Amino acid sequence: MSNDITKGHSVIIGPDEGRSLWQPLPSRGYVDVNLTPDNMVYETFSSGIQVMPPGCTVGEHGHKQNHELIFVYEGTGQVKIDGKLSEFGPGTTILFGRNCTHWIKNTGETDLKMFWIFLPPGLEQLFYAIGKERKPGDPMPEPFERPDHVEEIKEKLHFMSPGNTD
C-alpha cells in the first residue's frame, strides 16, 4: 500500500500580471483575464476580474454550455436572471447556470468590481475578440463599439441571444 500523494499544479497571478483588455459599450471598463488553460494545466475553467463603471451593463445573454460564477467585491448593482430582478452589493456571489439568460447593471456611483470563474473556459475568448489591449494605469479610452461580427463570435462560443433558450 502506497502513501504517495499526487500534488496538483499551483499558479499565482499577481495584480496586473494577467492579460488586460478595455471593454466596448455597453460594459466599458476593463477585464483582466488571469487563469486560462493557456497558462495553467487545468482545462476545466478560466477566471479573472471585471471592472465596470457606474451606469454600464453586461448585456442580456446566456451560455449553452457553461456556468458562470461571479463574486462581487466592490460596488452595487442589479442582476436579472430569467426575468427575475435582484439587487446586490459587496460580498454577493451569483451563479448563472447554463441556459439561463442574465444581465448585470452597475447602479452605484463607483466602479463595480467582480471576480468571475467560467466553467468550462471560453469567456476569455469573447473578451479577447471584442476588447482592446490595456496596460495597467492607462486612462480609460473613449467609448468604443463592439465589432460588427460580435454575434458570430458569440454563436461560436455557444452564447445564447436575449430571450433565446434554444
Image (spheres, grey):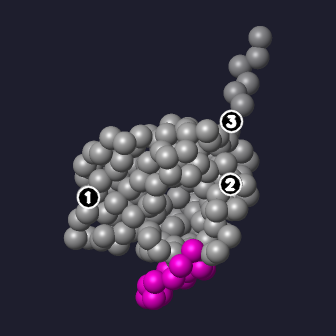
Check residue 76 in the rendering and tell me which mark sits there, or answer none.
Answer: 1
Task: Mark 2 or mark 3: name the one nearer the start of the chain.
Answer: 3
Label 2 CA crowd tier, 10 Å (few <14, some 14–19, many 20+): few
Does residue 52 lie above or below 98 as drawn?
Answer: below
Quadrant in the picture for residue 149: bottom right
Quadrant in the picture for residue 94: top left
Q: Is residue 23 left or right of residue 112?
A: right
Instruction: Give how far across and how far down residue 155 sits, in percent.
Output: 68, 54
Residue at 33% x, 41% y: name it. 84
Task: Mark 3 or mark 1: name the one nearer the start of the chain.
Answer: 3
- The kind of residue on which mark 3 rests is Lys
Instruction: Write down the residue under mark 3.
Output: 7
Residue at 45% x, 88% y: name it. 142
Residue at 29% x, 53% y: name it. 78
Check residue 56 in the rendering and tell me which mark sits there, or answer none.
Answer: none
Label 1 CA crowd tier, 10 Å (few <14, some 14–19, many 20+): many
Q: CA distance from mark 3 to mark 1?
A: 39 Å
Q: CA distance from mark 2 to mark 3?
A: 37 Å
Q: Which range is magenta?
A: 132-146
Q: Quadrant of the C terminus?
A: top right
Does residue 166 lie above or below 79 as drawn?
Answer: above
The main secondary structure of the magenta stretch is: loop
Q: Is residue 75 left or right of residue 4?
A: left
Q: CA distance from mark 2 to mark 1?
A: 30 Å
- The kind of residue on which mark 2 rests is Glu
In this view, the mark in front (2 or 1): 2
Frontmost residue, 161 versus 17: 161
Task: Mark 2 or mark 1: name the one nearer the start of the chain.
Answer: 1
Q: Confirm whether the magenta stretch covers residue 82.
A: no
User: Does residue 76 appear in the picture of this structure?
Assistant: yes
- The kind of residue on which mark 1 rests is Thr
Instruction: Give how far across and how far down residue 49 sits, in percent.
Output: 47, 61
